[in-house]
Image (tube, helix red, strand yellow):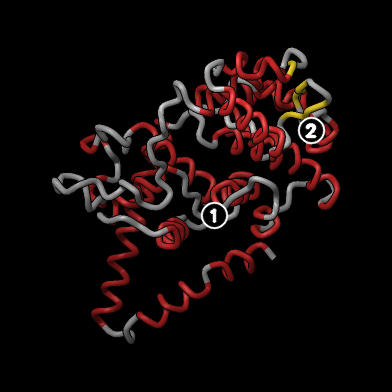
Amino acid sequence: MIAEGLISDDSDCVLRLRTSIPAAGPESRRARRDRRDERDGRHAQLISWWASERRDLPWRRTRDPWLLLVSEVMLQQTQVDRVVRYYEAFVERWPTPEHFARAALSDVLTAWQGLGYPRRARNLWRTATVITERHGGRVPADLNDLLALPGVGPYTARAVLAFAFGIDTGVVDTNVGRILARWTGRRLTPAEAQRMADELVPATEGWAWNQAMMDLGAHTCTKRDPSCGRCPVQPWCAWAGSGQPDPADRSAGVSTRQAPFEGSDRQARGRLLAALGTGGIERADVARTMGLEHDETRAERLARELIAEGLISAADSQLRLG
């Protein structure tokens, strides 16, 4: 079931690849052997490097699909160091989807304070309900079922498949997307990046390979000042030492620079949610709470958006969390 879903996802790509391969002959066999040797050499070098350089992260010590789903949602647009403390507190308090689904949304949002992007917490809470009601309390091991969960996109779904269920699928986050673009020496479309990531995964080593790729991007093949001289797979990189513009810029899977946080709508929303974590607030005090005393129209717009998103509720003249 899982394999069929993954194959059908890229069946058109596979068909094009197969039909483009020339008829077997001495040169084509040699070319295929060279590509295989290159791939195997890259795999061996990267896994060997990772054996001594790997990061010790709490979600790497488990294969529990729910705990891994929690970690992946938290890691969306948030640095690893910030996530560790929140992750450990969350999984201790809500160790299963059933526990999380029974929680009050206000409690979930209060516990999420400081991680940012609170709609992720709301989506995770809704996802726990779906898992409990439709999947018997078990995180599904099917790509399409995972993608149907609130807030779960292609990266998160494949991360759960690879890290919880051991499926050999490529996981393309911003670090992996950057590496793939540099290896090829050009910008990649989402379909190209995913296809390349899938093809690179060594059989039965999806967990280790994807983790190694992420660590390589986090510590060596970084966005700024990459350490090409210390990269274990530098010989296979088309961009290293070329002097060309970085192909990872605006390539598939690579995040773009966010707008400044200071003075942003995100900052104002965060202030209101943090204040609501301690109790209700009068509607008349919203602009002051957000730090927008001189822009009440903007404050009211943001409050209405939070209500529409289900992050806060309004009762009479008061706003409350959840």
**Residue ID at (45%, 62%):** 191
Distance, label 2 to label 1, CA atoms, is 32 Å
Above or below, 235 relative to 5: above
- For marks 2 and 1 on the same chain, the one whose residue lies earlier in the sequence: 2
Q: Nearer the viewer, residue 33 or 21?
A: 21
**Residue ID at (48%, 41%):** 211
Whether residue 93 is visible to the viewer of this picture, yes or no, is no
**Residue ID at (25%, 82%):** 26
Q: Which mark is residue 204?
A: 1
**Residue ID at (36%, 56%):** 40
Q: Tell me the amino acid under the disc marked 2.
A: Phe
Residue 291 screen position, x and y as percent: 55, 15
Q: Nearer the viewer, residue 277 or 290?
A: 290
Q: Which mark is residue 33?
A: none
209 left or right, relative to 187: right
Classed neighbour count for the residue bearing mark 2: other residues with Cα under 10 Å, few (<14), some (14–19), many (≥20): many
Q: Which mark is residue 100?
A: 2
